[in-house]
Amino acid sequence: MAGEIPDLEARERTGTGKGAARQARRDGMVPGIVFGGDVDPLPINIPFNVLIKKLRAGRFKSTLFNMKVDGHDDVRVICRDVQRDVVKDLPTHVDFMRLRRTTQINLFIPVEVVGEENCPGLRKGGVLNLVRPEVELVVTAGDIPDHVTIDVSGIQIGESVTISSVDLPQGAKPTIARDFVIATISAPSGLKAASEDEEDADVAEEEAPEEAEAEE
């Protein structure tokens, strides 16, 4: 299970309709609704500053939240829609869906690297490039992994680790169909420069005879 599901605190909204929503916005709140889970929808208000901060952090719609509302049990939710002002592009309403343990959702899962001490590419001075520090997976709400582990032991300079070589948690699968790269071991900058100089020298040697023939 994921160890760090962020809390999202909200307040129950007593009124409904456009009037209550407008009052909430005047009070520095963003009205919203929590639906699903075979229970009645719950109208809520979220502090504007809290919501805008989370929106600007990115991936709001693919983050699982533990919603806390006074007088109600905590519930895991995921955002399904954020309505925005057409002029100011600021949030005016937000919809959340309660999740059952069997609900499948798309989430970004952190990547953990192991085997660096046994990586021949790193021992030779190579550099580990974590192309994707997170991978988006389809997971079930009741079995969300803390991380995805990639093993770089045995990886040489110029080689990479792709999603097909990773043992994913049971029931999880990538959202991207192709075999994408997660990490690579690249040559150190000094070795790259030396290689480029050699290539330039080879090109110069090949061009020199051609120039000499042209002059003759």
Image (cartoon, helix red, strand yellow):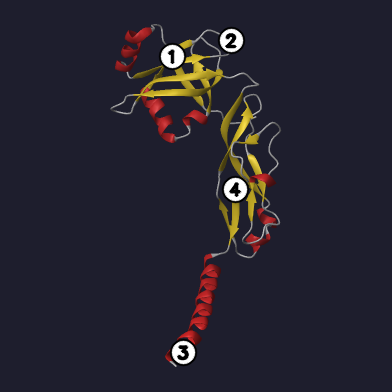
Question: Alpha-carbon distance for marks 4 and 1?
Answer: 39 Å
4 vs 1, front mark: 4
Q: Which mark is residue 172?
A: none
Q: Specify which label sits upstream in the sequence, 1 or 3.
A: 1
- Residue 150, image x, y percentages: 66, 46
1 vs 3, front mark: 3
**Crowding near the residue tagged with mark 4, few <14, some 14–19, many ≥20 C-alpha atoms within 10 Å:** many
Question: Alpha-carbon distance for marks 3 and 4?
Answer: 48 Å
Residue topped by disc 3: 212
Q: Which mark is residue 38?
A: 2
Would residue 90 be found to the left or right of residue 4 on screen? left
Q: Which mark is residue 182?
A: 4
The relative height of residue 196 versus residue 15 in the rendered view (above or below) is below
**Which residue is at a point 51% across and 70% down the rendered structure image?**
193
Question: Alpha-carbon distance for marks 1 and 2?
Answer: 18 Å
3 vs 2, front mark: 3
Camera-side residue of 188 and 4: 188
**Crowding near the residue tagged with mark 2, few <14, some 14–19, many ≥20 C-alpha atoms within 10 Å:** few
The relative height of residue 171 versus residue 176 in the rendered view (above or below) is above
**Which residue is at a point 50% across and 18% down the rendered structure image?**
68
Give the quarter of the figure containing the C terminus. bottom left
**Circle 1/circle 3 CB separation < 8 Å:** no
Amino acid type at circle 3 is Ala
Secondary-structure class at tag 3: helix
Residue topped by disc 1: 44
